[in-house]
Amino acid sequence: MSATPARKVAIVTGAAQGIGRGIAVRLASDGFDLAINDIAANADKLNDVLRDLTAHRIQQEQRVVIVVADVSNEKEGGLDAMVANAGVAVNKPILDTSADEWDRLMSINAKGTFLCYKYAAEQMIKQGRGGRIVGACSIVGKKGTPEAAAYSASKFAVRGLTQSAAQEWGKHGITVNAYAPGPIDTDFLAKFDEYHTSKSGAPKGSWREAQKATTATGTLGTPQDVAGLVSYLVSDAARFITGQSIIIDGGAVFD
C-alpha cells in the first residue's frame, strides 16, 4: 500500500478489537492511510472496524484496507509506521503449561512481532525516509507474574527485540519502541478475570475490579489511553525516543 504525497501509511496488526482497534481509530484520526490486520476468525470484527475508521477519516481521500493474515507467518510491505499489536495470552501455572501452548504463544507474540519488525524495517530502509515501529510489550514484560509465565516471557522477548532493533536501525532514521500496558479495560482483561475468578470462586468481574486498586489513579485504562501514546510514538515529534518499552498502567508498576 503506497501513500498519497501528503499522507503516511501505517499497518496495525490485531486491529479487530481492544487496544488494536483503539490504535487504528486514533491513527485514522491522525490522518494516516491504514492497513488493518487480524486473523480470519476476526474478519467480521475487522469489517466493523473498517466502518468505524471510515467515520474517523479527516480527509475523504484517506484509504483504509483490510489485510486478513496470521502475523506468525505472513510478510507485509510498504509503510511509514508499523504497529505490531497482535498477541494472545495463556493463564496457567508453569507446571500446567504444555509445550504446544508455549510454542503457540511464542509464535504469535514473539515471532509475530519479530516478523513485523523485520519486514517493516526492510521496507523502510528501501524507501530511505525512516519510519516508526511500535510493538506490544506489557507490565509483565517488566516483571514476571505467576500463572502467566509463557505470556510474561513473550513480552520480555518483545522488550529485548525492541532494544536490539532500535540500535540496529537508528542509523536509517527508524525508531523502535513498545508500549507496556497494565490493566486496560478490554475483552483481553476479561479473560484474565474469568481465569482468576473461576479458580478462586469469587464473583465474575471481581478480579477485574480489584485491578483498580493496583493503580495510583484507582482506575482501569482504556484502549484510547494506549492509542494516545502510540499516536505520539509514530509522530515526527518522537524522533529522539527509541528502544523504550513505555509503561502505561495508571501507576501500577514503576521502572
Image (spheres, rainbow, N blue to C red):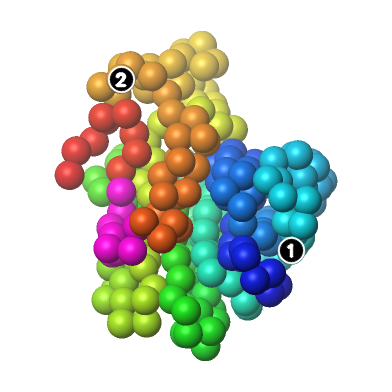
Residue 1 in the image, given as x and y percentages of width and height: 70, 72
Taking the spot 59% from the left edge, 33% from the top edge, the residue there is 187
The answer to whether residue 86 of the structure is visible from this angle is yes
Rendered residue at 61%/57% (across/down): 32
How far from the left and from the top, in percent, is residue 188?
A: 54, 37
| 25 to 165, vertically: above or below | above
Distance from the alpha carbon under mark 2 to that under mark 1: 37 Å
Is label 2 in a helix, a strand or a loop? loop
Mark 1 or mark 2, which is nearer the start of the sequence? Answer: 1
Q: Which mark is residue 67?
A: 1
The residue lying toward the viewer, choosing from 250 and 55, is 55
Position of residue 102 in the picture relative to residue 23 (left or right): left
In which quadrant is the C terminus drawn?
A: top left
Residue at the limit of the structure toward the top, as seen here:
203
Inspect the image, locate mark 1, and give the three-letter code of the amino acid beneath it. Answer: Val
The answer to whether one can see residue 149 in this image is no
Q: What residue appears at the point 43 percent right and 16 percent down from the top-left corner?
A: 209
Residue picked out by circle 2? 217
- Using residue 49 as the reference point, say whether residue 150 is left or right of it: left
- Residue 27 horizontal side relative to residue 59, left or right: left
